[in-house]
Image (cartoon, rainbow, N blue to C red):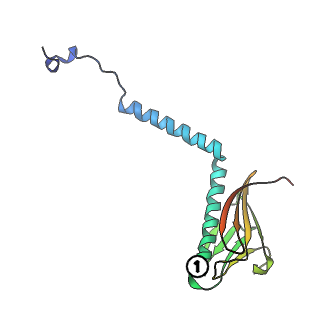
């Protein structure tokens, strides 16, 4: 009798995994990967810190590009106490209140006390400055070069006083 014609009871048992078992293992591996990533990157605070820093850096770059494209100076404003920023083109945003915000820059670019500002010129240059966002001992600094207006995002640490 050929193997194809054997009765069901006589067929050999084939070892393997069911689809449900495979999906369960994949879900466990994904959960472990997420937990490991959070442990290595500082958890939710670390992810929030990076996300906010990247957003501010992107808005600084946009403001510089707008100054070059329009041929008109453009101002990026940041209010560390209000955790808010304002970029060219009426773009506005808030920074998570759980983060510490610091600004270092020239006073001549500021319009109001307690507010920081970086002015970008049509040639791409700027007044320069540094915006630092921090959570715990981790921090990211966004540096804007005064001569070129280049914006760089750098990982930093909060230094004890």
Furthest residue to the right? 161
Displayed quadrant of residue 151: bottom right
Residue sitting at 65 percent across and 70 percent down? 150
Displayed quadrant of residue 53: bottom right
Q: Nearer the viewer, residue 56 or 69?
A: 69
Classify mark 1: helix, strand or loop. helix
Q: Is the N terminus in the top left, top right, bottom left or bottom right quadrant?
A: top left
Q: Is 29 rendered above or below residue 125?
A: above
Residue sitting at 62 percent across and 44 percent down? 38
Q: Nearer the viewer, residue 6 or 127?
A: 127
Q: Is the C terminus in the top left, top right, bottom left or bottom right quadrant?
A: bottom right
Inspect this view and state whether residue 139 appears. Answer: yes
User: Is residue 12 toward the left or the right of residue 47 in the image?
Assistant: left
Q: Nearer the viewer, residue 76 or 70?
A: 70
Residue sitting at 62 percent across and 76 percent down? 64
Displayed quadrant of residue 7: top left
Residue 20's x, y, as percent? 38, 32
Q: Is 77 rendered above or below residue 73?
A: above
Residue 34's x, y, as percent? 56, 42
Q: Is 18 rendered above or below residue 50?
A: above
Q: Nearer the viewer, residue 44 or 14?
A: 14
Instruction: Find disc 1 in the rendering and name its residue.
Output: 66
Residue sitting at 13 percent across and 19 percent down? 5
Residue 40's x, y, as percent? 64, 43
| Count of numbered circles on the image | 1
Inspect this view and state whether residue 89 appears. Answer: no
User: Is residue 111 toward the left or the right of residue 150 in the image?
Assistant: right
């Amino acid at each position: 009798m050929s193997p194809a014609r054997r009765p069901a009871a006589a067929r050999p048992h084939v070892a393997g995994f069911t689809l449900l078992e495979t999906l369960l293992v994949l879900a466990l591996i994904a959960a472990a990967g997420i937990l490991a990533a959070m442990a290595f990157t500082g958890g939710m605070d670390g992810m929030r810190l990076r996300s906010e820093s990247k957003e501010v850096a992107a808005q600084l770059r946009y403001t510089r590009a707008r100054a070059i494209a329009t041929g008109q100076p453009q101002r990026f404003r940041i209010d560390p106490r209000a955790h808010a920023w304002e970029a060219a083109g009426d773009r506005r945003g808030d920074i998570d209140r759980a983060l510490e915000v610091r600004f270092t820059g020239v006073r001549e670019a500021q319009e109001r006390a307690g507010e920081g500002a970086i002015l970008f010129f049509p040639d791409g240059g700027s007044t320069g400055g540094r915006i630092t966002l921090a959570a715990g001992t981790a921090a990211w600094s966004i540096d804007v070069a005064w001569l070129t207006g280049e914006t760089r995002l750098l990982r930093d640490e909060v230094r004890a006083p």
